[in-house]
Amino acid sequence: MEIRITSSISIDDSELEMQAIRAQGSGGQNVNKVSSAIHLRFAIGTSSLPQELKKKLLSLKDSRVTNDGIFVLKAQSFRTQEQNREDAIERLIAWIKAATIEQKPRRATKVSKSVKVRRGEVKKQQSAKKTLRKKVEF
């Protein structure tokens, strides 16, 4: 099954390794019996993603990416295993999609002359106000 990330990028379902594990947190006896959380592992280096995207994903400072280039995600928000599986896949898609967005290069701007003049006038007014607060000497 193909998992579509963008119109041009998709990954195969077989590239994901999902394992059911026991969820943490409250839930009483049920939490100790049922493996409803999902542990998703996605090997970035061996995936079918474009090479530039792989480099970008590996260069991100994300604690979920191991030194071996494997993206590890734990989904345990929901009570059922199937909902957690869908949540894990959605979060993986969102993570990859965020890396595809190109940021515009920043253009340096200058402060206009009129803004500099206005700032100077405001500073003069503040200075005058504070000198009026000083102690009067006779």
Image (tube, rainbow, N blue to C red):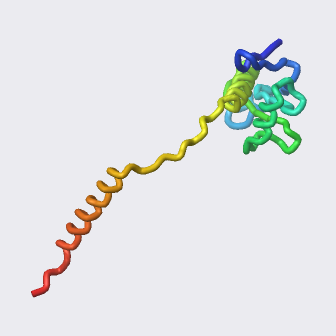
Q: Which residue is outermost to the front?
A: 113
Asked whether 51 or 86 is in front, the reply is 51
Q: Could you tell whether 1 is left or right of 107 in the image? A: right
Question: Above or below — where is 1 with respect to 30?
Answer: above
Q: Is residue 70 visible?
A: yes
Question: Above or below — where is 1 with respect to 97?
Answer: above
Image quarter for residue 25?
Answer: top right
Residue at figure coordinates x 73%, y 45% from the top left: 61
Residue 58's x, y, as percent?
80, 39
Q: Is residue 21 visible?
A: no
Asked whether 104 or 130 is in front, the reply is 104
Asked whether 13 or 115 is in front, the reply is 115
Residue 65's x, y, as percent?
79, 40
Asked whether 104 or 65 is in front, the reply is 104
Question: Above or below — where is 63 with respect to 13?
Answer: below
Residue at figure coordinates x 38%, y 49% from the top left: 112
Residue 45's x, y, as percent?
87, 33
Image quarter for residue 14?
Answer: top right
Q: Which residue is outermost to the top?
A: 1
Q: Which residue is outermost to the bottom?
A: 138
Q: Could you tell whether 41 is left or right of 31 in the image? A: right
Q: Could you tell whether 33 is left or right of 123 in the image? A: right
Image quarter for residue 98?
Answer: top right
Residue 129's x, y, as percent?
20, 67
- Quick one: quadrant of the C terminus? bottom left
- Quick one: quadrant of the N terminus? top right
Residue at figure coordinates x 83%, y 30% from the top left: 51
